[in-house]
Amino acid sequence: MTRLSEKKKKELAAAALEVRKRAYAPFSGHAVGAALLAEDGSVFTGCNIENSAYSPTICAERAAFAKAVSEGFRKFMAIAVAGGFEEVPEGYCAPCGVCRQVMAEFCGKDFIILLVRTPEDRREYTLEEIFPLAFRIEETEGRPSGKEAP
Ligand SMILES: [Zn+2]
């Protein structure tokens, strides 16, 4: 089990709340921020970016993963997610199914998901808890993982 200090969890939660202010959500009004912690301590943030055609919309979590992976990072420890309609989120915003599948691509079962209302008010889960029986191609018999490619 990956261990994260209380200080690091607070920092990650605060980063998710901060980047949430940049959310582009004119259609739903549901602003989301995410802060992804790479294994080396780097933090990549993302916000949701909606689109008038709807389906090109990208979630905050996937925006953060896209930034990290495109910078060469593939190993992650945790992600903090904050979302809602209000200035201070009234509830805990859980990642959608698509984002959970993206997490399963790069993260182990002990990857930590922090659902954040404030830096101190959080709920903590593992990827295994929120996405059991994830599709992982390396666990599919007789198929190459594809992860050996550079
Ligand atoms: Zn999502």
Image: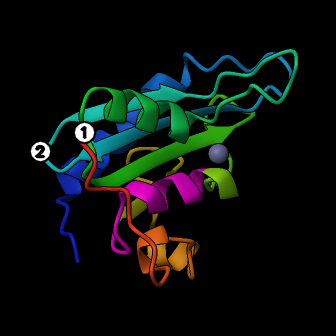
Please name the amino acid that badge 1 sits on: Phe
Ligand 1 is in which quadrant of the figure?
Answer: top right
At horizontal 47% and vertical 38% (from top left) the residue drawn is 34
* Residue found at the very far front of the displayed protein: 142
Q: Magenta residues: mostly which secondary structure? A: helix
| Residue 71 vs residue 39, the one in the foreground | 71
- Of the numbered discs 2 and 1, the one sitting upstream in the chain is 2
Instruction: Give the class, few, some or many, for how many residues have Cα within 10 Å of label 1's Cα (few <14, many ≥20).
Output: some
Does 91 appear above or below 51? below
At horizontal 54% and vertical 47% (from top left) the residue drawn is 117
Q: Position of residue 81 (x, y in %)?
A: 51, 46
Position of 78 with respect to 140 (left or right) is left
Q: Quadrant of the C terminus?
A: top left
Image: magenta residue range? 99-110
| Residue 107 vs residue 18, the one in the foreground | 107
Under circle 1, the secondary element is loop
| Residue 30 vs residue 53, the one in the foreground | 53
Position of 72 with respect to 93 (left or right) is left
Return the residue at label 1: 73
Return the residue at label 2: 40
Q: Where is residue 149 in the image (x, y as percent from the top left)?
A: 28, 48
**Residue 40 on the magenta span:** no
Determine the CA span between mark 2 and mark 1. Answer: 9 Å
Please name the amino acid that badge 2 sits on: Asp
